[in-house]
Amino acid sequence: MKIQSLKDLKKISQAYEKQIYAPEGIKVNIGMASCGIAAGAQAAMDKALETYRDNKNVEICQTGCIGFCEQEPLVEILAVNKPRVLYQNITEDKIIDAIEGYMAGEFNKNKKSILGQLRDPRSLLDDDIENPLDGVEPIDDIPFMEDIPFYSAQVKVAMRNCGYIDPDCIEEYFAKKGYIAFLEALKKNKPAEVIETVKASGLRGRGGGGFPAGIKWATCAKHHGDRYIICNADEGDPGAYMDRSILEGDPHSVLEGMLIAALGIGSSQGYLYVRNEYPLAVKRLVTAIKQAEAYGLLGKNIAGTDFSFKINISTGAGAFVCGESTALMASLEGKVGRPRAKYVHTVEKGFRESPTNLNNVETYANVPAILLKGADWYTGMGTEHSKGTKVFSLVGKINNTGLVEVPMGISLRDIIYDIGGGIPKKKNFKAVQTGGPSGGCIPEQFLDLSVDFDELAKVGSIMGSGGMIVMDQDTCMVDVARYFVDFLRDESCGQCNPCREGLKQMLDILTDICDGNGKKGDIEFLEEIGAMMQKFSLCGLGTSAPNPVLTSILFFRDEYEAHIRDKKCSAGVCKPLFHYEIDPDACNGCTLCAKKCPQNAVAGKKKEPHVIDQENCIKCGICYEKCKFDAIKIC
């Protein structure tokens, strides 16, 4: 069936609303994004499919990532007149018990496996859809999802459908008001209004630069020629997986955002540039494009109009620098992925020397919601110059790892301690790096800093694409700087001297410092190199690459000085600069450290203080981690 009107679309969507909100039997939604699969969701799904193969009353379905990756595999079970329940850590050996227990109403029996109840499964866009859970009795002593700290402060816009629909089912996307914004804009045939709405919303690019999307669209639309729409899905920051999860959980939101952008600027061709390391995202995008084409929402003469738009997928070869817009376009053209000087803007001469609009996955995913709810709705969230919400991947030394979508302006403290649950093992927070390998390291004194584009820049960091790496007291900031510089050195295209040689020199100096060979003047030399790179590098990779070094020197200079002057690494990371000792007053002779030591370097009688043979000790840290009495010290 080719969709010709909003009436056609709404007819299909109404048929599938029941599938999402009130299925006829028991519906089991299993989180089948990469995080869930890695935790064992595929085996759980296979077991459930095999067990209920002949049971028409139980439907086993896949969904994307609902965000709480720490608790994967996540399984949601729902039925008419029953609570909608989300189970955690449901692996192959637990899936059948969870389903049978739900059907029998034995929720308290499975209490430890239940993460919470969903009071209202609707997204921000579904406020006019009748809630099928009205009147359903809640489960005693089991929290509602919105009351759980991880979810309570979140507002889902870009990730509004992730975890709630089958990403391989376009009809379920229709049921969540999918493609309505595009069709309404198409039938009005007023591209300028589309651009003005995006401009009025204050939406800024979520790929790192934060440039206002509406202004970019308007500028691109002014230039003549074959205009192109490109989606940057070349997410390469260590610890970042926001774009991947949106593509795996809700690919149609990105396609619709690209369609709206194409309508606004007058483009007939689009490209999705996806990391080759994201095979599941690519697979679901291929399926989504075929489905949209089958319904006549992609291709020629869409919905009976003269508007045509085709989307192609290109997979990158893993070069981090191809996340930079001009390098990405060069790669799309079959050339070496190298950036070019910015005095010629890509909205004027970009892909194939033609006007090109490039945004990232999260930016496009926001667009349909903005057109449906209006610019004023979107500007009601966020801060004066950073509107809406932002998706962050919260990783590192944090209890609740996962994806969080929060309004701009929320504090780092709220994200790390309220949503993230704080630091494991009650250790002390030390720093958080935002913005990926080119971001800055922000210390404890700025935990109450508002998270938006401008405030992060004030402390030498960046928003970036949304990676957020938390570090605790056992993190060496010199080693952190060395790690990121090493990563960036390998990923630099090498085209300009400041970046190529600057990163090499920085890495050599940082390696010497970590090896105990640092010398007076090294810190000042690092600062000098960093300032030179920021001023003279060709692209954003080079200009932002010194951020981890410069911010760690600014806020943790004492650590650098201790490494150089005292030859000490207080965090116990740089092996030439520390050793372990057992405090005889704290050791009770439990023998656990001796049993765990792979080198038999710990000796002592039971119930008596132990000692470490320094010659045999390889500083692996196992004894330090396993000691329950804090008797092992870093010296």
Image (spheres, grey):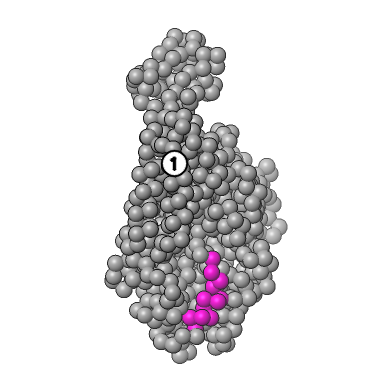
Question: What percent of the width, then of the height, locates residue 244?
Answer: 44, 59
Q: Secondary structure at mark 1?
A: loop
Residues in magenta, as a range: 210-221
Instruction: Name the residue: 56% across, 47% down.
Output: 442
| Amino acid carrying mark 1 in the image | Gly
Lateral position of residue 607 relative to residue 154, left or right = left
Q: Is residue 320 magenta?
A: no
Instruction: Name the residue: 47% across, 55% down.
Output: 531
Q: Would you place residue 540 above or below residue 47 in this image?
A: below
Q: Is residue 508 visible?
A: yes
Q: Would you place residue 205 above or below residue 564 in this image?
A: below
Camera-side residue of 599 and 139: 599
Question: What percent of the width, then of the height, locates residue 464?
Answer: 50, 59
Camera-side residue of 187 and 583: 583
Q: Which residue has dot 1 on it?
A: 521
- The chief SS type of the magenta part is helix
